[in-house]
Amino acid sequence: MLTGRVLTVWEPDGLQMQIVEPFTFTDAAGRVWPVPAGFVTDGASIPRALWSIVGSPFTGAYRVAGVLHDSAYSQLGVTKNDADNMLREAAMDSGCEWWLAESIYAGVRVGGLGPYSESQREAANIKGST
């Protein structure tokens, strides 16, 4: 269940958005997934070749799930498996058709290791510098 509204502004690069107000998603197990104000996202990581089939990063019922997933990857200690499972659940909760939620989930399971590892390194560096 989504709590709060997803309010964003475009970043100057025109490719990313910044979250203006914090919001959360609570999954079926009761785990709360926060997205803080100021978080910058590039939306759902969908290869450009598939945009005509499933949509682009900031369109469709999965767009909020993509932002939640980006935020989850950037939270130090969140496992890739937990974040990916939350993505699928959040997509379904947002009204995504099951086949699309499963396709997006399969995509991040296969192609998400690099972005996950990079986000966790960045989170560790930020935490280590504070």
Image: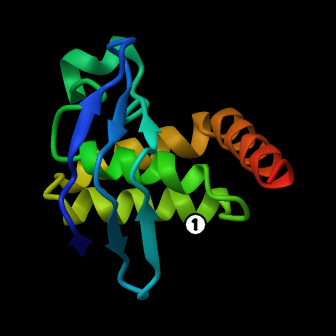
Is the residue 79 above or below the residue 101 in the image? below
Which quadrant would the C terminus be assigned to in this image?
A: bottom right
Tally of numbered discs: 1
- Hey, which quadrant is residue 41 in on the image? top left
- The residue closer to the viewer here, 49 or 39, is 39
Q: Residue at x 41, y 56 (%)?
A: 87
Q: Residue at x 45, y 37 (%)?
A: 40
Is the residue 91 above or below the residue 100 in the image? below
Q: Label 1 crowding class (10 Å Cα cut-off): few <14, some 14-19, many 20+?
A: few
Is the residue 59 above or below the residue 15 in the image? below
In the current view of this chain or complex, which residue is farthest to the bottom?
A: 30
Q: Which residue is mark 1?
A: 82
Q: Secondary structure at mark 1?
A: helix
Residue 15 screen position, x and y as percent: 36, 17
Which quadrant would the N terminus be assigned to in this image?
A: bottom left
Q: Which residue type does callout 1 highlight?
A: Asp
